[in-house]
Image (cartoon, rainbow, N blue to C red):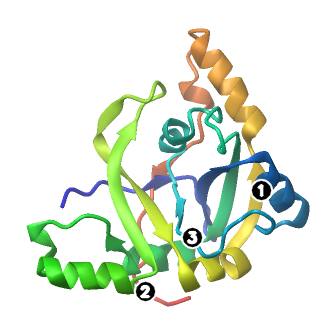
Amino acid sequence: MQRGEIRAVYTQHSIRVYQAYSDFIVNDAIKNGRFGAGFKMERMTWIKPSFLWMMYRCGWAEKKGQERVLAIDIKREAFDFLVKNAVVSSYSDDLGITKDEWKLAVVNSDIRCQWDPERDINGNALENRSIQIGIRGKAVYDYVNSWILKLTDITDYVHELNHMRLSGENILNLLPDEKVYEVTWEGQI
């Protein structure tokens, strides 16, 4: 299994992940300080600490249903818990378990992870890989109700960067300052 490194904006207490949604979901989330109307608690939702991977995924906030981008600061210990307890989304022989054991782990886990090619500002795949984490069930409940510290609508920032990018301006120094993030393996949430 090819893994990469986690790169993110983080502090001593929080790490930033990104999600993109429709106006309806984001307006309600910003108004109430948490996800509510339109957010489907019963579905798997994916969080991404890489800003450029999120831009690739949502088309710089131009894809239908992903017109708004949220920067979501969550508790570091919650993110670490997710990483430590995630089941990878695709099987490989180097997992150290059989394919049947992996399938059972996927069915029984509320947390998945994928390591996808990181992206440059134009969406081109890079050599290094970036993590995205899928959560459902109890993990989504905890995410929405106790792990989120702050929701910030960054859609205007995304649009401004995209306009500059498309105009040929160098936006690299305007991107979020993501650094390598080391998961803390001690403690529980």
Residue behind mark 2: 186
Mark 3, Cα crowd under 10 Å, few <14 / some 14-19 / many 20+, is few
Helix, strand or loop under label 3: loop
User: Callout 2, which amino acid?
Assistant: Glu
Residue that appears at 47% across and 76% down = 82
Return the disc, 3 or 1, that comes first in the chain's sequence: 1
Return the disc, 2 or 3, that comes first in the chain's sequence: 3
Residue 62 % position (x, y) = 64, 32
Residue behind mark 1: 25
Return the disc, 2 or 1, that comes first in the chain's sequence: 1
User: Callout 3, which amino acid?
Assistant: Arg
Residue 41 % position (x, y) = 65, 74
Residue behind mark 3: 43
* Cβ–Cβ under 8 Å for marks 2 and 1: no
User: Callout 1, which amino acid?
Assistant: Ile
Foreground disc of the pair 2, 1: 1
